[in-house]
């Protein structure tokens, strides 16, 4: 099934395209649900387990590390073995890890289980992007990633709201029970409704050496890595917001858990709209120009945030700046994913892995920095967000803007 087959006529093609986007968006949404659903319960978790703010945030860091390292394995494996088997096994292990998280009463055990949960959940994230590249290319891929963002973007909206409402009837343990049930539902949907997209003749041949080698070859492509670092740093800024916002907004500004969930959801809606706007603008002006403008908005929004928290401008100014900082990730993600994968069809799983790993690893390093100043100051969070956006813009300008059509991108499939 190629892009033309999926596009088809308007009457016949759109339902198939949307169903595929619904499936893949749900799979990539498992990552945000894993991270975001228990954010409103982080302060309660810290009190229940008698640990510090930074220690509670360590469970988030462990999950991010698992999501990152798991993608490095799941992506290349899916290039060699196909998409379905690694995806189904990953969802099963995720369900088991989530159920164990629900039963633990030890912070150390929870951190370890959160790492395993992220490790298993990474399969859905990386393989979903690879399946999209199996079906589409060029600007059709950009359009589909925008549709994927429409579905996937609902996850940051629904997850914290669901988490906040769950706290009305259960503790943080119940959040992990819901995650386990969600993964079982996704496993059943993938089993019956998601066919294999990578035919045997298109898979990477040569065993483990060739599979791992694909990751190394991609590292030598400056243009590809420029997109990887650009998106990764933009995502790290969002992870800094994810890690610190629940403490900052609830403890410094007095926002309730339910109020925090609403703010978080509104920012998630911003991601959806920015992703759609970025895709539409790309059809007119091209993905690279839209990406550059999006990065400029990210730097401006994060600078406004830092000024707002230092000058104590109030909750409204902080929330408005956060909206810009978070929403712009939708446009950055849509354009970066498409530009990075367009020349990597033969190793889409490995390329998708690097796209996911960069954000997770940099985010895992940025998240603890947010808590170093304590839970009652927003300055560290705002500073980390600004640094990440500035570095993202520099990565695009230095590695990508002047390096287009590198030979490594064109000849990779021949070398494989």
Image (tube, helix red, strand yellow):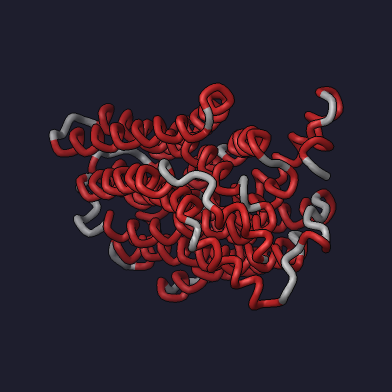
User: Does 243 sit above or below residue 259?
Assistant: below
Q: Is residue 136 left or right of residue 222?
A: right
- List the single residue furthest toward the front: 407
Please tell me which residue is depicted at 60% across the width and 54% down the height of the picture.
125
Q: Is residue 371 above or below residue 106?
A: above
Q: Position of residue 343 (x, y in %)?
A: 62, 49
Q: Quadrant of the C terminus?
A: bottom right
Instruction: Identify the residue at horizontal 70%, vertical 63% (top origin).
Output: 79
Q: Picture coordinates of residue 68 (x, y %)?
A: 50, 63
Q: 59 and 360: which one is in front?
A: 360
Residue 77 shows in this picture = yes
Indicate the quadrant where residue 201 lies.
bottom right
Q: Nearer the viewer, residue 125 or 258?
A: 125
Q: Quadrant of residue 261?
A: top left
Q: Is 194 displayed left or right of 270 in the figure?
A: right
- The correct choice, above or below, for 228 with respect to 416 in the image is above
Q: If the image is split into quadrants, where does the N terminus sit? A: top right
């Amino acid at each position: 099934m190629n892009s033309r087959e999926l596009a088809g006529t308007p009457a016949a093609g759109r339902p198939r395209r949307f169903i595929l986007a619904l499936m893949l968006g749900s799979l990539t949404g498992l990552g945000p649900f894993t991270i975001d659903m228990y954010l409103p319960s982080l302060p309660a978790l810290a009190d229940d387990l008698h640990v510090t703010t930074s220690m509670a945030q360590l469970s988030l860091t462990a999950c991010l590390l698992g999501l990152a390292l798991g993608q490095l394995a799941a992506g290349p494996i899916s290039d060699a073995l196909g998409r379905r088997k690694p995806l189904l096994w990953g969802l099963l292990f995720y369900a088991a890890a989530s159920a164990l998280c629900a039963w633990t009463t030890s912070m150390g055990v929870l951190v370890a289980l959160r790492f395993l949960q992220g490790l298993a959940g990474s399969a859905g994230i990386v393989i979903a992007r690879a399946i999209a590249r199996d079906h589409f290319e060029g600007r059709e891929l950009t359009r589909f990633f925008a549709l994927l963002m429409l579905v996937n973007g609902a996850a940051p909206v629904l997850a914290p709201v669901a988490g906040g409402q769950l706290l009305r009837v259960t503790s943080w343990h119940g959040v992990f029970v819901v995650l386990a049930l969600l993964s079982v539902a996704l496993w059943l949907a993938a089993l019956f409704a998601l066919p294999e997209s990578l035919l045997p003749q298109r898979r990477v041949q040569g065993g483990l050496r060739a599979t791992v080698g694909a990751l190394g070859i991609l590292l030598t492509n400056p243009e590809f890595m420029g997109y990887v670092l650009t998106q990764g740093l933009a995502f790290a800024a969002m992870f800094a917001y994810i890690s610190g916002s629940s403490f900052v907004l609830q403890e410094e500004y007095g926002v309730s858990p339910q109020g925090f969930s609403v703010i978080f959801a509104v920012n998630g809606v911003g991601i959806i709209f920015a992703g759609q706007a970025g895709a539409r603008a790309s059809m007119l002006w091209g993905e690279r120009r839209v990406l550059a403008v999006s990065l400029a908005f990210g730097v401006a929004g994060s600078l406004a945030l830092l000024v707002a928290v230092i000058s104590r401008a109030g909750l409204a100014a902080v929330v408005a700046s956060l909206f810009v900082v978070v929403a712009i990730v939708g446009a950055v993600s849509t354009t970066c994913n498409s530009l990075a994968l367009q020349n990597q069809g033969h190793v889409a799983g490995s390329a998708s892995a690097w796209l996911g790993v960069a954000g997770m690893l940099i985010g895992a390093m940025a998240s603890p920095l947010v808590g170093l100043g304590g839970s009652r100051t927003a300055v560290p969070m705002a500073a980390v967000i600004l640094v990440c956006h500035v570095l993202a813009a520099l990565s695009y300008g230095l590695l990508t803007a002047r390096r287009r059509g590198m030979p490594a991108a064109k000849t990779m499939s021949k070398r494989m």
